[in-house]
Image: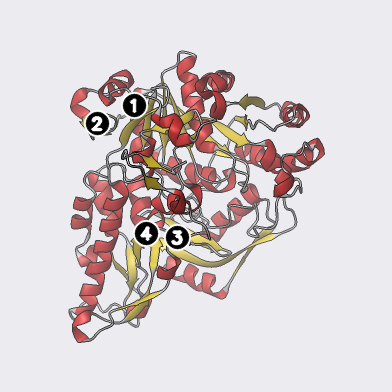
Amino acid sequence: MPADIQIARAVPPRPIAQIAEDLGVPARYVVPYGHDKAKIVAPLPAEPRGRLILVSAMTPTKAGEGKTTTSVALAQGLARIGKKGCVVLREPSLGPIMGMKGGAAGGGYSQVIPMEDINLHFTGDFHAITSAHNLLSALLDNHLHQGNALQIEDRSVLWKRVLDMNDRALRDVVVGLGGRTMGVPRQTGFDITAASEIMAILCLSEDFADLQRRLGNILVGFRKGTREGVYARELDAQGAMAVLLKDAIHPNLVQTLEGSPAIIHGGPFANIAQGTNSVIATKTGLAYADYVVTEAGFGFDLGAEKFLDIKCVSAGLKPSCVVIVATVRALKLHGGVKFRDLSQPDPAAVERGLENLAAHLDSARGFGLTPVVALNHFTADAEEEVAAVRALCEARGVRMEVCRGWAEGGAGATDLARAVVEVVDAATPGFEPTYAWEEPVQVKIDKVARALYGADGVTYSNQARADLADIERLGLSGLPVCIAKTPASLSDDPKLVGRPRGFTITVREIEIAAGAGFLVPVTGDVMRMPGLPKVPAANRMGIGADGQIFGLS
């Protein structure tokens, strides 16, 4: 197989105006960014026409599961069987691209293009979010320097700065050094842009009014001696922040390798935010396509749960089907096989690892959704291993199809597309959330921990209990919970693979994302600013004498 970038470069893109016309977007709502990408500025429909398909996965492993590749393949497969579909995905962050991933626009013959632009600066959305976030940081520090009329306790400031790059040296910094004219010295730090609350806000907002309201609701710190909250609106920050986001709020239209429409917008992390594309992007897809394929980050217990309990409830979205991506390789890792031995056939290990897949199937059923398993095929997969997965699905009455989208594009996903269409067309759109937003915070956390993780219960640190008191005093108990935990396990211990039992979840603190409109109970060690590996993907990249980029994957 050629490299992803070679495959993508070999496909001449269709003019973006044709993609918009095929999707049905009127030309007056299409703002081109060159010939192969555009912003869609259409108003959102009161009643979307399309049916929503969520792509999730089993618990991630370092072998990779391929949700994005499968999502793109499914969209291409829908087009091949004559269905009007659209894939709606998140934008990649530069940090992981330059760090471990090297690219995040799908893979093989199931990619979105122009992959070089999508993987790099694209239409500038991430930069706009970085600027809006850091504007609030600058206004806040300026307020402290100019007399601090709001009486903000500088040690209580919650708002950091962001950068769309993996840079561990910026996790903890001191600002304001250098003398009286340089600001108020205080300890702070940087997060990666994908972890910014502005990113979460942009992806949950439905229009400019909603955006500005949410921006004004950002909790930046507390007043001296009172623990009374101070919000961005008190700094008169929300208007200028929204101005910086005036273009970024509109979703981006591109295409798959096979010329079907793709909408790419937003990129919140799935461990500390909702981990899915914007509400505006999803509703735009639903306004014009009959079948909309979207993806939530990490496994079903993280991305899908937040997609359903936060995004869908907030925006009134009703999915008709959930596709759970699995691989033989990942199942073997959950079954106890060492990474170096994954190429060796081991049906018994696959059977042991199926406990993990079964947990996610149970979770999907718990939401009232019908799951379809997409077995993302690798060339080394043995027939006996595939048969073991099929046997589990048949025993549970779940459709399973092998997806060969990486090697064959849409042709390798037509069986999956037909299965999904059958489920969607037979479904009554709707689902049952895990909890009601108005329930007590601890009840909401407990319900997610038991239903999605399989935990026996939840314990709280002293800090977390103090945070609960702050939340109650600020009147924010009615917000949903966006639990941050390791993606590598159903538990909060990344070493517990498979389907752990007999464990409790420990909440060590609860962050308040009042602008985004959710609370973030933090379990374990959650990284908001990743670091680069010993040999970053960036070391493989460059531009040749012909001006062509190389090294992206």
Q: Is residue 475 above or below residue 79?
A: below
Q: Nearer the viewer, residue 28 or 45?
A: 28
Q: Which residue is mark 3?
A: 477
- The nearer-to-camera label among 4 and 1 is 1
Q: Which residue is mark 4?
A: 514
Tag 2–tag 1 contact (CB < 8 Å): yes
- The nearer-to-camera label among 3 and 1 is 1
SS label for mark 2:
loop
Q: Residues within 10 Å of mark 3 (few under 14, many from 20)?
A: many
Q: Earlier in the sequence, mark 3 or mark 1?
A: 1
The answer to whether residue 130 is left or right of residue 360 is: left
SS label for mark 3:
loop
Q: Report the amino acid beneath label 4.
A: Ala
Total numbered badges shown on the rendered structure = 4
Q: Is residue 387 above or below residue 489?
A: above
Tag 3–tag 1 contact (CB < 8 Å): no
Q: Earlier in the sequence, mark 3 or mark 4?
A: 3
**In x, y percent, where is residue 289?**
38, 23
